[in-house]
Image (cartoon, rainbow, N blue to C red):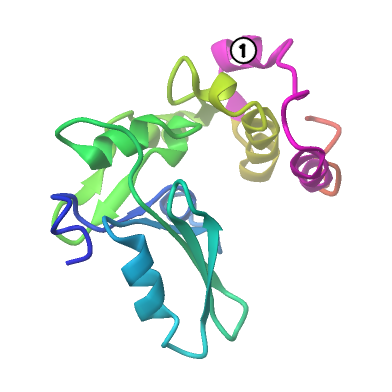
Amino acid sequence: RCMKEANVPTALVGGWLRDLVLNKASGDVDLICGDPDQLARKLRHYGGAKAVLLDAVRRTWRVVFANGSYIDISAPRGEGPDLLVADLELRDLRVNAMAWSPSLGFIDPLCGLDDLRDGVLRAASATALTDDPLRALRCWRLAIQLDLALSSKLRDDLDGLVLDEVAGERTASGLQQILLHPKAPVA
């Protein structure tokens, strides 16, 4: 019902679906919703949850439950007649550009399932890395965490990518996640 006014179904998107397909545990739960403000307010009443606005422009909320688990909720990004697909097309990697909603079922417009089957990471679009250069670190982190190879195109796109415009805290956090992994030398 959350997206009814926006004509877009509420959908589970991204990493949780990827990890489910790979049969891996995941705490990365992301929802897109036409009215994330309303959904965040409703969810905070369950189990002593707290709702924190992470990004007012993108209307992104994090609802943190008493047990420490959390859900990120945001409005769909992009434009066009199908806001769900438009949102998926703006994601970092094809393996993260999948969605599931009760009304539509499983949606995989960029063939992320094929990439998982092939054991490879590919960018979701030609501008995925330049839209947010920190995604370069996420590519390497996911490659080692999920034991996936970078496509030759993605590897070429990563060469020479500069993180100068990324906040130092974000870069430090991304590097820490890579360096603390046992397969860090691969990255």
- State the residue in front, 69 or 6: 6
- State the residue in front, 119 or 52: 52
Q: Report x, y in % for residue 148.
A: 60, 33
Q: Which residue is mark 1?
A: 157
Q: Residue at x 30, y 57 (%)?
A: 33
Q: Report x, y in % for residue 66.
A: 58, 86
Task: Answer left or right for 185 relative to 29.
Answer: right
Magenta stretch holds residue 165: yes
Magenta-colored span: 149-178
Magenta stretch holds residue 141: no
- On the question of residue 104 being in view, the answer is yes
- State the residue in front, 83 or 29: 83
Up/down of 130 relative to 182, above or below: above
Q: Residues within 10 Å of mark 1 (few under 14, many from 20)?
A: some
**Dominant secondary structure of the residues highlighted in magenta in the image:** helix
* Amino acid of disc 1: Asp
Q: Residue at x 42, y 87 (%)?
A: 46
Q: Residue at x 69, y 32 (%)?
A: 140
Residue 77 picture quarter: top left
- On the question of residue 26 being in view, the answer is no
Quadrant housing the N terminus? bottom left
- State the residue in front, 176 or 149: 176
